[in-house]
Amino acid sequence: MSTGRLEAFSDGVLAIIITVMVLELRPPNGSDFSDLHRSATSLLTYLLSFVYIGIYWNNHHHLFQVCKLIDGSVLWANLHLLFWLSLYPFTTAWMDEHFSRASTVVYGVNLLLAAVAFTILQRRMMRMPESKDRMAEIFGRDRKGKASLLLYATGIGLAFLQPWLALVPYIAVALIWLLPDPRVERYLQRQLEAGNTEHL
Amino acid sequence: MSTGRLEAFSDGVLAIIITVMVLELRPPNGSDFSDLHRSATSLLTYLLSFVYIGIYWNNHHHLFQVCKLIDGSVLWANLHLLFWLSLYPFTTAWMDEHFSRASTVVYGVNLLLAAVAFTILQRRMMRMPESKDRMAEIFGRDRKGKASLLLYATGIGLAFLQPWLALVPYIAVALIWLLPDPRVERYLQRQLEAGNTEHL
Amino acid sequence: MSTGRLEAFSDGVLAIIITVMVLELRPPNGSDFSDLHRSATSLLTYLLSFVYIGIYWNNHHHLFQVCKLIDGSVLWANLHLLFWLSLYPFTTAWMDEHFSRASTVVYGVNLLLAAVAFTILQRRMMRMPESKDRMAEIFGRDRKGKASLLLYATGIGLAFLQPWLALVPYIAVALIWLLPDPRVERYLQRQLEAGNTEHL
Amino acid sequence: MSTGRLEAFSDGVLAIIITVMVLELRPPNGSDFSDLHRSATSLLTYLLSFVYIGIYWNNHHHLFQVCKLIDGSVLWANLHLLFWLSLYPFTTAWMDEHFSRASTVVYGVNLLLAAVAFTILQRRMMRMPESKDRMAEIFGRDRKGKASLLLYATGIGLAFLQPWLALVPYIAVALIWLLPDPRVERYLQRQLEAGNTEHL
């Protein structure tokens, strides 16, 4: 199967998740600048989750630029990823309304399970015969992916001690992914130089 | 007519339905793990409906991979299917808030009518001259489709006796569809081997 | 300009409008079948607006199958149409919550202005040099379009007398459009027979 | 990288933002025409924000018609723009519910930051080697863009004196962009005349 419709559907779901969260942002109840203050943490929480979804969209985009022929197992691995991402508005809203040990742990567990789902999706795609070698070359070591899993797990542990501490590793994951992936950029650069624009 | 825009529109609607349901998930009112408990059944109901919509997306994707030229009747048969699927958030929310005989019956009726609409869509597509033979070969017997209709009807009957019992056949339908359809996979495999990538 | 992105954006907006309305459907407050009764009129109102949006999607699809090169004025005529369609959830919700002279008049005015916007869009597209002749041949007389404008205006008049009466011409418009447009089907059929699949 | 998926994702986000704002429009509480009066300012505010998003979609569409090969920095510049646009429903709702100095200043700041983000995106895209010359020729002077930044800043200043005054420059920006960009139209016209339909 080709990946066109899977990409379109995932784009739709990610676009909705990223904008649905802004619906949770209630406008301030008063009319002064000071009333905006209460919305400030909500805005920061929204920003964090926006960045995560943006990162997933970016990485998803990279994966499917390299791998173009998939089977049914990839469809389900992708839906599995979308399921955990679709819970972000829910866990984000809880952490925003009740910042506590429980809500930061649950937020971290959601982040961790989405990262695990992404790893599974990547592994499934590495088995597709058509793109096996390219995928292994580019995503084979996956140090960023492994570091993310570790950081999320650390965050969940820290959340049990002190909720605010958990945010440090959570934010660290966002930071290490914010830069575009040099492996994919290099691969695409080489393709371009080789005059092979088919996979661009 | 080609199917490109119909697929894009359906992807949009399905993507929204699948994520709109998560908006119904209210974050817990307290800040402890125990407060999450009340959200647990909501999460399971959400998971069930997410899986159903995922299955429909998968099957819809399969149908339109085989049939590429359609007429106006398919447009309406598709909108008819989307109508029943668009009611899932409504019937899911009712069953979640008031788990009762009435709400499980209505949920089952919604599931059944969506399955009937899918059967109608498939039948209409089997009449398209361009893909008639391929469609008949792949979807001709449609045992899974018939079993689903039977299971939904059984669930509706059981719901009158005891709401919880209805969930058994409802979940059974999800399980029999979770695996990708070997008929389509085999067809696509043969196409690939024959070097015919036009329909992929 | 080609129409690809305009179609994708319009599909997105229409997909959201059609599903956003279902969010207005509140699940019943009780757990019995009788509690569903209160939702019944909401469901019928939802069905009516779903059918209208479905018709617009169908007709929009037909227009852009015939006309493939557009200019900036078509972009704005299309956004103008989407604006009036985006108000359907608002006017539908008002009519549903307060069925009165005012709300049925406003609903009709919304329907009428969307129909006027569609007529403007069609006229603009008839001026595109590349598809001028095809468009004039297919959409030249536009009897259905003119009948719709007349019926909506009649409905608005009747709503001043008696709100329920207004629904008769409103529903009549939906019925005359439910069948696919034979003019477009004929055109596409001829193209297919001539082996010209470029515009399909 | 090609721009197909970036455009599809942006279309999705913009389509949702433009329609999500209509969800903020509560239907009137009464059943008379006079009850609609209270919704009138909400409708005007909605219209203004709809026009802004429509303008961004138009301009975004123009940008990506000229530039077809991008790198990772454009992906993030685009997400940065979508972030500020995704806050429109939030700042629009606040200004609508509490029309005050603070809310009009914050609305203006949101408009300004989105315009800055668009300028950054355009600058990044002007560096792409493949389309550098075309971009410089078409968007080089960018007088409309600079005028917008100035007008937004003026509006924010005026909002501190008198909230209503701020609306004059805000609306002025919408008006100067409502007309399609003659630079892009001219470019596309020349391409068409040269028989070069590749970038259309």
Image (cartoon, coloured by chain):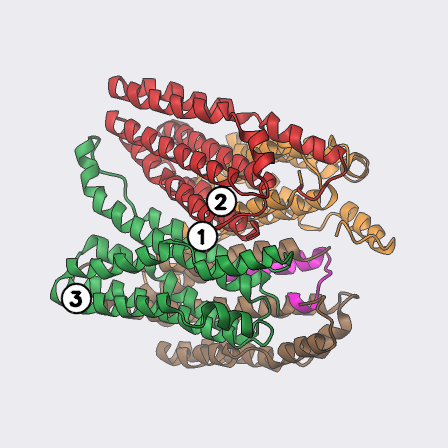
Chain colours: A orange, B red, C green, D brown
Q: Indicate the position of residue B135 as horizontal and vertical percent values.
A: 57, 35
Residue at which label 3 appears: C158
Q: Is mark 1 on a helix, strand or loop?
A: helix
Magenta span: chief secondary structure: helix
For marks 3 and 1 on the same chain, the one whose residue lies earlier in the sequence: 1
Tag of residue B15: 2
Q: Which residue is depicted at the point 43% across and 58% down?
A: C181
Q: Is mark 2 on a helix, strand or loop?
A: helix
Chain letter belonging to callout 1: C
Residue at which label 1 appears: C15
Disc 2/disc 3 C-alpha distance (Å): 39 Å
Q: Which residue is depicted at the point 59% across and 59% down?
A: C191
Circles 2 and 1, Cβ within 8 Å, touching? The answer is: yes
| Type of amino acid at the residue the image marks with label 3 | Leu
Q: Which of marks 3 and 1 is in front?
A: 3
Q: Looking at the image, is C11 positioned above or below residue C69?
A: above
Quarter location, residue D147: bottom right
Disc 2/disc 1 C-alpha distance (Å): 9 Å
In the picture, the quarter occupied by the C terminus of chain D is bottom right
In the picture, the quarter occupied by the N terminus of chain D is bottom right
Around disc 2, counting alpha carbons within 10 Å, would you say few (fewer than 14), some (14 to 19), or many (20 or more)? Answer: many
Q: Do labels 3 and 1 share a chain?
A: yes
Decide if residue C20 is on the left or right side of residue B11. left
| Type of amino acid at the residue the image marks with label 1 | Ala
Stretch in magenta: D64-85
Q: Looking at the image, is B126 positioned above or below residue D191?
A: above
Around disc 3, counting alpha carbons within 10 Å, would you say few (fewer than 14), some (14 to 19), or many (20 or more)? Answer: many
Q: Is mark 3 on a helix, strand or loop?
A: helix
| Type of amino acid at the residue the image marks with label 2 | Ala
